Protein backbone atom coordinates (compact mmCIF):
# COMPACT_ATOMS: atom_id res chain seq x y z
CA UNK A 1 0.00 0.00 0.00
CA UNK A 2 2.75 2.44 0.93
CA UNK A 3 4.37 2.45 -2.52
CA UNK A 4 1.28 3.43 -4.45
CA UNK A 5 -0.36 5.80 -1.98
CA UNK A 6 -1.54 8.76 -4.03
CA UNK A 7 -4.47 10.32 -2.15
CA UNK A 8 -6.84 12.58 -4.08
CA UNK A 9 -6.11 16.29 -3.81
CA UNK A 10 -9.66 17.39 -3.01
CA UNK A 11 -10.89 20.01 -0.52
CA UNK A 12 -12.50 18.89 2.75
CA UNK A 13 -16.18 18.16 1.98
CA UNK A 14 -18.07 19.17 5.15
CA UNK A 15 -21.57 17.65 5.37
CA UNK A 16 -22.49 19.00 8.81
CA UNK A 17 -20.73 20.86 11.60
CA UNK A 18 -21.89 22.20 14.94
CA UNK A 19 -20.43 22.74 18.42
CA UNK A 20 -20.05 18.97 19.09
CA UNK A 21 -19.67 17.07 15.82
CA UNK A 22 -18.16 17.31 12.35
CA UNK A 23 -19.30 15.07 9.50
CA UNK A 24 -17.38 14.93 6.25
CA UNK A 25 -17.56 13.04 2.96
CA UNK A 26 -14.32 11.03 2.74
CA UNK A 27 -12.95 10.56 -0.78
CA UNK A 28 -11.92 7.09 -1.92
CA UNK A 29 -8.16 6.55 -1.78
CA UNK A 30 -7.55 8.63 1.35
CA UNK A 31 -6.56 7.01 4.65
CA UNK A 32 -8.79 7.79 7.64
CA UNK A 33 -5.78 8.02 9.97
CA UNK A 34 -2.04 8.26 9.27
CA UNK A 35 -0.13 5.12 8.39
CA UNK A 36 3.42 4.30 9.46
CA UNK A 37 5.93 6.66 7.85
CA UNK A 38 5.84 10.22 6.53
CA UNK A 39 4.62 9.10 3.10
CA UNK A 40 1.39 7.90 4.76
CA UNK A 41 0.81 11.02 6.86
CA UNK A 42 -1.86 12.55 4.60
CA UNK A 43 -5.22 11.36 5.93
CA UNK A 44 -8.73 12.56 6.59
CA UNK A 45 -8.02 13.16 10.29
CA UNK A 46 -5.08 15.47 9.42
CA UNK A 47 -7.13 17.31 6.79
CA UNK A 48 -10.02 17.76 9.22
CA UNK A 49 -7.68 19.01 11.98
CA UNK A 50 -6.13 21.53 9.56
CA UNK A 51 -9.54 23.25 9.43
CA UNK A 52 -10.94 22.15 12.82
CA UNK A 53 -7.92 21.73 15.16
CA UNK A 54 -10.14 20.29 17.90
CA UNK A 55 -11.39 17.36 15.73
CA UNK A 56 -11.09 13.96 17.46
CA UNK A 57 -11.25 10.49 15.91
CA UNK A 58 -14.33 8.34 16.56
CA UNK A 59 -14.21 5.62 13.87
CA UNK A 60 -12.56 4.79 10.54
CA UNK A 61 -13.40 3.87 6.97
CA UNK A 62 -11.15 1.74 4.77
CA UNK A 63 -8.81 3.76 2.57
CA UNK A 64 -10.64 2.71 -0.59
CA UNK A 65 -14.16 3.37 0.78
CA UNK A 66 -15.74 6.80 0.36
CA UNK A 67 -18.54 8.45 2.30
CA UNK A 68 -19.82 9.75 5.61
CA UNK A 69 -17.36 9.91 8.49
CA UNK A 70 -18.00 11.56 11.86
CA UNK A 71 -15.47 13.34 14.08
CA UNK A 72 -16.04 14.68 17.58
CA UNK A 73 -15.24 18.30 18.33
CA UNK A 74 -15.17 17.88 22.14
CA UNK A 75 -13.94 15.09 24.45
CA UNK A 76 -17.56 14.70 25.67
CA UNK A 77 -18.75 14.10 22.10
CA UNK A 78 -15.92 11.62 21.48
CA UNK A 79 -16.96 9.55 24.53
CA UNK A 80 -20.65 9.79 23.66
CA UNK A 81 -20.19 8.73 20.02
CA UNK A 82 -17.63 6.05 20.93
CA UNK A 83 -20.17 4.41 23.24
CA UNK A 84 -22.79 4.46 20.49
CA UNK A 85 -20.42 2.58 18.19
CA UNK A 86 -19.53 0.16 20.98
CA UNK A 87 -23.19 -0.56 21.77
CA UNK A 88 -24.09 -0.81 18.06
CA UNK A 89 -26.49 2.10 18.30
CA UNK A 90 -25.10 3.80 15.20
CA UNK A 91 -26.95 2.95 12.02
CA UNK A 92 -24.83 3.00 8.88
CA UNK A 93 -25.87 2.27 5.33
CA UNK A 94 -23.61 1.74 2.35
CA UNK A 95 -24.06 1.67 -1.39
CA UNK A 96 -22.09 -0.98 -3.27
CA UNK A 97 -21.83 -2.15 -6.84
CA UNK A 98 -21.09 -5.86 -7.01
CA UNK A 99 -20.12 -8.39 -9.65
CA UNK A 100 -22.95 -10.44 -11.17
CA UNK A 101 -26.70 -10.04 -10.96
CA UNK A 102 -27.90 -10.98 -7.47
CA UNK A 103 -30.97 -13.21 -7.84
CA UNK A 104 -32.79 -12.52 -4.56
CA UNK A 105 -34.24 -9.14 -3.60
CA UNK A 106 -32.85 -8.96 -0.05
CA UNK A 107 -31.20 -11.04 2.62
CA UNK A 108 -28.92 -11.27 5.66
CA UNK A 109 -25.38 -12.63 5.86
CA UNK A 110 -24.26 -13.97 9.25
CA UNK A 111 -20.65 -15.17 8.94
CA UNK A 112 -18.01 -14.69 11.68
CA UNK A 113 -14.76 -12.99 10.65
CA UNK A 114 -11.17 -12.94 11.80
CA UNK A 115 -7.96 -11.49 10.38
CA UNK A 116 -6.17 -13.79 7.93
CA UNK A 117 -2.77 -13.45 9.63
CA UNK A 118 -0.47 -14.58 6.80
CA UNK A 119 -2.35 -12.27 4.41
CA UNK A 120 -3.28 -9.35 6.64
CA UNK A 121 -5.04 -6.94 6.45
CA UNK A 122 -7.33 -9.44 4.69
CA UNK A 123 -10.06 -11.02 6.78
CA UNK A 124 -11.74 -14.38 6.31
CA UNK A 125 -14.62 -16.46 7.64
CA UNK A 126 -13.76 -18.58 10.69
CA UNK A 127 -16.58 -20.39 12.50
CA UNK A 128 -14.36 -21.38 15.45
CA UNK A 129 -12.44 -18.20 16.26
CA UNK A 130 -14.16 -15.47 14.23
CA UNK A 131 -16.17 -12.63 15.75
CA UNK A 132 -19.84 -12.34 14.90
CA UNK A 133 -20.48 -10.30 11.75
CA UNK A 134 -23.96 -9.61 10.36
CA UNK A 135 -24.90 -7.67 7.24
CA UNK A 136 -28.39 -6.95 5.86
CA UNK A 137 -28.53 -6.36 2.12
CA UNK A 138 -31.06 -5.21 -0.44
CA UNK A 139 -30.89 -5.08 -4.23
CA UNK A 140 -31.49 -1.61 -5.69
CA UNK A 141 -30.82 -2.26 -9.38
CA UNK A 142 -29.46 -5.00 -11.66
CA UNK A 143 -27.57 -3.77 -14.70
CA UNK A 144 -25.35 -5.36 -17.33
CA UNK A 145 -23.96 -8.15 -15.19
CA UNK A 146 -23.60 -6.08 -12.03
CA UNK A 147 -25.89 -5.21 -9.11
CA UNK A 148 -26.31 -2.01 -7.12
CA UNK A 149 -27.05 -2.78 -3.47
CA UNK A 150 -27.71 -1.11 -0.16
CA UNK A 151 -25.78 -2.76 2.67
CA UNK A 152 -26.60 -2.25 6.34
CA UNK A 153 -24.02 -3.74 8.71
CA UNK A 154 -25.32 -4.69 12.17
CA UNK A 155 -21.74 -5.22 13.39
CA UNK A 156 -18.58 -3.27 12.58
CA UNK A 157 -15.89 -5.79 11.69
CA UNK A 158 -12.90 -4.87 9.56
CA UNK A 159 -13.62 -5.49 5.83
CA UNK A 160 -17.01 -6.96 6.85
CA UNK A 161 -18.98 -5.82 3.81
CA UNK A 162 -16.18 -6.73 1.42
CA UNK A 163 -15.80 -10.29 2.73
CA UNK A 164 -19.55 -10.83 3.07
CA UNK A 165 -20.19 -9.81 -0.54
CA UNK A 166 -17.41 -12.12 -1.72
CA UNK A 167 -18.94 -14.98 0.30
CA UNK A 168 -22.32 -14.21 -1.29
CA UNK A 169 -20.60 -14.86 -4.62
CA UNK A 170 -20.78 -11.21 -5.64
CA UNK A 171 -17.55 -9.37 -4.74
CA UNK A 172 -17.60 -5.57 -4.69
CA UNK A 173 -16.33 -4.17 -7.98
CA UNK A 174 -12.79 -2.84 -7.87
CA UNK A 175 -11.91 -4.60 -4.61
CA UNK A 176 -8.13 -5.20 -4.66
CA UNK A 177 -8.34 -7.83 -1.91
CA UNK A 178 -11.51 -9.83 -2.54
CA UNK A 179 -12.38 -9.44 -6.24
CA UNK A 180 -10.59 -11.18 -9.11
CA UNK A 181 -10.37 -10.86 -12.87
CA UNK A 182 -12.82 -8.48 -14.54
CA UNK A 183 -14.56 -7.77 -11.19
CA UNK A 184 -11.35 -6.19 -9.95
CA UNK A 185 -10.73 -4.08 -13.05
CA UNK A 186 -12.44 -0.87 -11.94
CA UNK A 187 -10.93 2.54 -11.15
CA UNK A 188 -11.94 2.33 -7.48
CA UNK A 189 -13.60 0.14 -4.85
CA UNK A 190 -17.32 0.59 -5.51
CA UNK A 191 -18.25 0.98 -1.83
CA UNK A 192 -19.62 4.19 -0.31
CA UNK A 193 -20.81 4.98 3.21
CA UNK A 194 -24.12 6.59 2.27
CA UNK A 195 -25.63 7.53 5.63
CA UNK A 196 -24.92 7.62 9.34
CA UNK A 197 -27.63 7.86 11.98
CA UNK A 198 -26.53 8.75 15.52
CA UNK A 199 -27.80 10.32 18.72
CA UNK A 200 -26.45 13.84 19.00
CA UNK A 201 -24.06 14.20 21.97
CA UNK A 202 -25.92 17.38 23.01
CA UNK A 203 -29.40 16.19 23.98
CA UNK A 204 -29.52 12.79 22.30
CA UNK A 205 -31.66 13.75 19.32
CA UNK A 206 -31.60 11.23 16.46
CA UNK A 207 -29.65 12.74 13.56
CA UNK A 208 -29.06 11.34 10.06
CA UNK A 209 -26.39 12.69 7.71
CA UNK A 210 -26.10 11.46 4.12
CA UNK A 211 -23.66 11.72 1.22
CA UNK A 212 -24.64 10.66 -2.29
CA UNK A 213 -22.58 7.87 -3.85
CA UNK A 214 -20.23 9.21 -6.55
CA UNK A 215 -20.77 6.12 -8.73
Image (cartoon, rainbow, N blue to C red):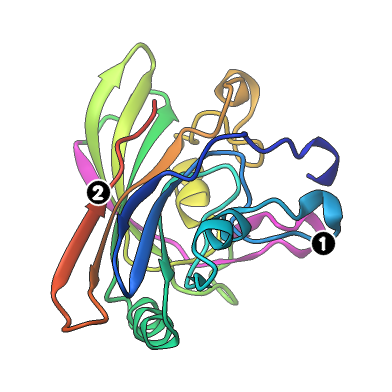
What residue sits 42% from the left and 44% below the top?
13
What residue sits 67% from the left and 54% below the top?
122
Judge the density around disc 2: few (<14), some (14-19), many (≥20) Cα neighbours within 10 Å. Answer: few
- Give the SS element for disc 2: strand
What residue sits 29% from the left and 67% below the top?
18
Q: Quadrant of residue 133?
A: bottom left
Is residue 108 found inside the magenta-colored segment of the image?
Answer: yes
Q: Could you tell me residue 210's position as x and y percent? A: 26, 48
Residue 194 got which mark?
none
Q: Which residues are magenta?
A: 105-124
- Tell whether label 2 touches label 1 (CB within 8 Å): no
The disc, 1 or 2, on the residue closer to the chain's N-terminal end is 1
Q: Could you say which is closer to the camera, residue 30 or residue 116?
A: 30
Return the residue at label 2: 107
Judge the density around disc 1: few (<14), some (14-19), many (≥20) Cα neighbours within 10 Å. Answer: few
Q: Could you say which is closer to the camera, residue 12 or residue 174?
A: 12
| 91, above or below 89, in the image | above
Residue 36 got which mark?
1
What residue sits 54% from the left and 39% below the top?
28
Mark whose residue sits in front, 1 or 2:
1
Q: Could you tell me residue 119's position as x and y percent? A: 78, 54
Is residue 136 found inside the magenta-colored segment of the image?
Answer: no
Q: Could you tell me residue 47's position as x and y percent? A: 58, 53
Q: Is residue 110 left or right of residue 119?
A: left
Q: Could you tell me residue 130's position as x and y percent? A: 56, 72
Q: Measure how far apart labels 1 and 2 are at the Cα level.
A: 38 Å
In this figure, what is the number of numbered marks?
Answer: 2
The N terminus: image quadrant: top right
Residue at the farthest top position: 144
| 206, above or below 202, in the image | above
Amino acid sequence: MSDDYAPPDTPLAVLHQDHEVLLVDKPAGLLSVPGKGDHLSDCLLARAQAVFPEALLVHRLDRDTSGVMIFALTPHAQRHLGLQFEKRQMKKTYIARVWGEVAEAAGTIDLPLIVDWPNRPRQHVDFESGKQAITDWKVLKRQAGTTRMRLTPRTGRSHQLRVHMKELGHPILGDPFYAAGAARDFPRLMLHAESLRFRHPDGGKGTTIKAKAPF
